[in-house]
Amino acid sequence: MKKTLIVYHYIPHYRKAVFDELLLAGDVMLAAGENANNDIEIISLEESFHSSEHVKLVNCWFGKETLWQKKLLLLIFKRKFKNVIFLASPYFISTWLSALLVRVMGGKVYFWTHGFVRDDSLKERLKLYFYFLANGLLLYGHHARSNLLKKGLPAEKLHVIYNSLDYDHQKQLRDAITEQQQKKVKKELFNSPEYPQLLYVGRLTYHKKLEMLLELVATLQKNGIPVNLLFVGDGEAKNKLVELTKHKEIEPLVNFYGACHDETILASLISSSDVCISPGEVGLTAMHCLGYGVPVITHSDVNHQMPEFEAIIDKKTGRLFERDSFESLYQVTLEFINEPIGNIRMNCIEEIEKRYTPKIQAKLIRRAIEGTNES
């Protein structure tokens, strides 16, 4: 019998590597649905994992956030797992009841969660009541842990497990890319491949404040420092960004590549860039770029960032600027271009290998549910 059950709403493609690591010991089962409430790339349980290692749930979405997962309560009642790890959302109604059932039956409940990232958010207050259902919280970062400590949760319940992508695959692709290939990619993307290449990879959404990047390119150009800007992704803000590019007359310097889910192609696009810039919050984009040795520039307001932001160390794995300040973004980018950070590529890779790989994440999850907290 499997002693640990992991319950997710669905399995995002980027989670497969860490689940593969968790399943290696043979004592873990996955339970998830296969229909999402957004356009994120998900994977099929049956196609991706051995049949004995998963249970397919039926997701019933109500609006954008509220979820009921059919078959979950029955699965927990019949199998009597020692530990159940839930992807924690207070809007998942079946999770409230399932967590209570696990506790009543003598099992332990763990919530895999962002925790309190934005301490001043009214929505976060609901989470506090929700979190009291759990024996432990598996957190992506230390800022969330600090916020929860301030809310009165005991330190022994708070376990930082970080985050990860498929780093082994990234490393394989990264090691195969030559300098000659990088130059070839730049020539294919831009008319002037000798210019520094800025990158944004991710969804093109309004809250990412991507218009700041176009203003950055235009201002640098005006001041005699031309750069190229590569957008890899698609989204609601694309048309407005394209129009703004034309208005600022910087079309030769901007490439809207579009969405890409092929990691081999992504590896070449990211590796050909000098730096990734995320004017708004930065999440897994940081993991993605640092894994290829590409530093990240983003804002420094931890209360308006995602947990992965913690991997960006100023003047070591990237640069930080004052949130919503174009002047600060411009100055930091200018410094980055004019004053290269020594060993920055290796700094980025070392930071990922120290904390943000599937092996490390799986190890920390196991350590948490086995009762050892070294956060």
Image (spheres, rainbow, N blue to C red):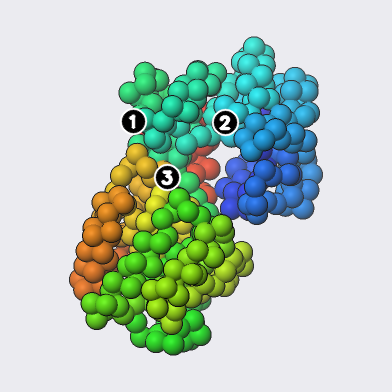
Between 205 and 362, which is closer to the camera in this rendering? Answer: 205
Q: Which mark is residue 89?
A: 2
Between 14 and 321, which is closer to the camera in this rendering? Answer: 321
Q: Amino acid at mark 2?
A: Ser
The answer to whether any part of residue 373 appears in the image is no
Residue beneath the point at 27% across and 77% down: 222
Q: Amino acid at mark 3?
A: Met
Q: How many marks?
A: 3
| Residue labelled with disc 3 | 306
Q: Residues within 10 Å of mark 2 (few under 14, many from 20)?
A: many
Residue 22 is situated, as x and y percent measured from the top left of the image, at 60, 42
Q: Which mark is residue 314?
A: none
| Residue labelled with disc 1 | 146
Residue beneath the point at 73% across and 44% down: 35
Q: CA distance from mark 3 to mark 1?
A: 14 Å
Label 3 secondary element? loop
User: In the drawing, does residue 164 fall left or right of residue 301?
Assistant: right
Q: Which is more N-terminal, label 1 or label 2?
A: 2
User: In the drawing, does residue 355 fall left or right of residue 109?
Assistant: left
Q: Are marks 2 and 1 in contact (CB under 8 Å)?
A: no
Residue beneath the point at 45% across and 32% down: 115
Residue 133 is situated, as x and y percent measured from the top left of the image, at 55, 18
